[in-house]
Image (cartoon, grey):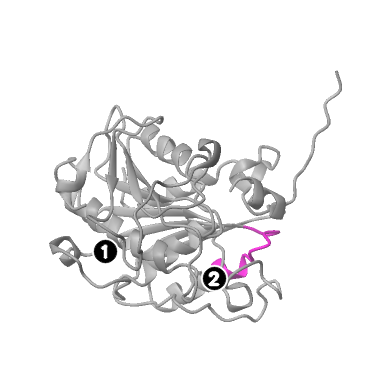
Amino acid sequence: MNFVKIRVSSATLFILLFVPVFFLARVSIPVSAQEKIELWPGLAPGETVREPNVEPGGSRATRVTTPFLLVYRPEKVTSDICMLVLPGGGYSTCFYFNEGIPNAEWWNAQGITAAVLVYRVPRPTGKPIYVPAWQDAQRAVRILRTNAPKWGLDPEKIGVQGFSAGGHLALLTALSSQTPAYEPIDELDSVSCRVNFALPVYPAYVLDDGASGPNQRKGNDAELAPGLNFDAGSCPMCLLHGDRDIYSPMGSVRIYSELRKKGIPCELHIFADAVHGFMFWNDAANTQSWRDRGLEWMKVMGYVH
């Protein structure tokens, strides 16, 4: 039998792949997470309905009105960190089964607790494409910080890792924590939503020539897209991007430059000849260590030992 190796374009790959404490409940779900936590006690901000989420084939979520966290605890805990994992999907879909869960399980293998956020999709109308997801991310950080002591974790060692649209969401969460994404609804919202470090992976929508899609001018001479507000809570980062990404690596370069100007520690990796979604390819030798790059940076920074 003859096998033909097909290299799918990054654009095609993108299409294919992609509570406060008393709301916490242990549930039976078809993944290895120990806990599922719904974010909001009733309707999420701006929502008018609360309905079952739509997950065609159990591979992704195409409509989410009741966002939630899946918490993954390692068998052997070796770190007091909690990593919030933000899947991609263009803010139209949430690919938490392939860009969320596998990465949470990898962190578990390193002895690190992780939580996957299944945020609201699709894109809203009449407001920036990221607003509902950003609201969910800020709420998620507050939930994780509140529960950290119970899980034996340090509430000041919360990191965020995101991919594609989730990478953009990680940047929003890491840079703009002093900007409220929603009006407080309960006591939980008095808890800080600042994350302590961030690992954005091939983030999309960073520059104004690609604020809602692939960069029109390859990101050259573009400005940062609205919403990314460097403030007193902006945290250290390790950025990873592919040089042939349709969502220009110049976005990550620009973030690195701004952080460096402000004296905030940052590491940047641009992988030669790597496309969007490089975590799914096994034929680009230079990208195979991308997870380790982030972990080694965390060790250098003293977040893990």
Q: Is residue 148 visible?
A: no
Q: Residue at x 35, y 64 (%)?
A: 48
Segment tinted magenta in the rendering: 242-253
Q: Name the kind of residue labelled 2 in the image.
A: Val
**In the rendered view of the protein, which quadrant contains the C terminus?**
top left
On residue 46, the disc is none
262 vs 164, nearest the viewer: 164
Of 11 and 270, the residue lying toward us: 11
Identify the residue shown where x is 21% and y is 52%: 19
User: Callout 2: few (<14), some (14-19), or many (20+) C-alpha neighbours within 10 Å?
Assistant: many
Tell whether 113 sits left or right of 246.
left
Image-quadrant location for residue 113: top left
Left or right: where 228 falls relative to 39 = right
| Image: 52 above or below 111 | below
In what element is the residue under mark 1?
loop
Q: Is residue 270 at least partly visible in the picture?
A: yes
- Mark 1: give few (<14), some (14-19) or many (20+) Cα within 10 Å: many
Q: Which residue is mark 2?
A: 206
Residue underneath mark 1: 193
How far from the left and from the top, in percent, is residue 144? 24, 51
- Say which residue appears at 30% left-offset and 27% top-offset: 75
Q: Quadrant of residue 288?
A: top right
Q: Does 246 lie within the magenta span?
A: yes
User: In this view, which residue lies farthest toward the top?
Assistant: 1
Residue flagged by tag 1: what amino acid is it?
A: Cys
Q: Which of 73 and 120 lies nearest the eye of the viewer?
A: 120
Gap between marks 2 and 1 measured at Cα: 21 Å
Residue 196 shown in magenta: no
Quarter of the image where one finds residue 138: bottom left
All told, the count of numbered labels is 2
Image location (x, y in percent) of residue 253: 56, 69
User: Where does residue 71 sit, x and y in percent of width and height?
Assistant: 31, 40
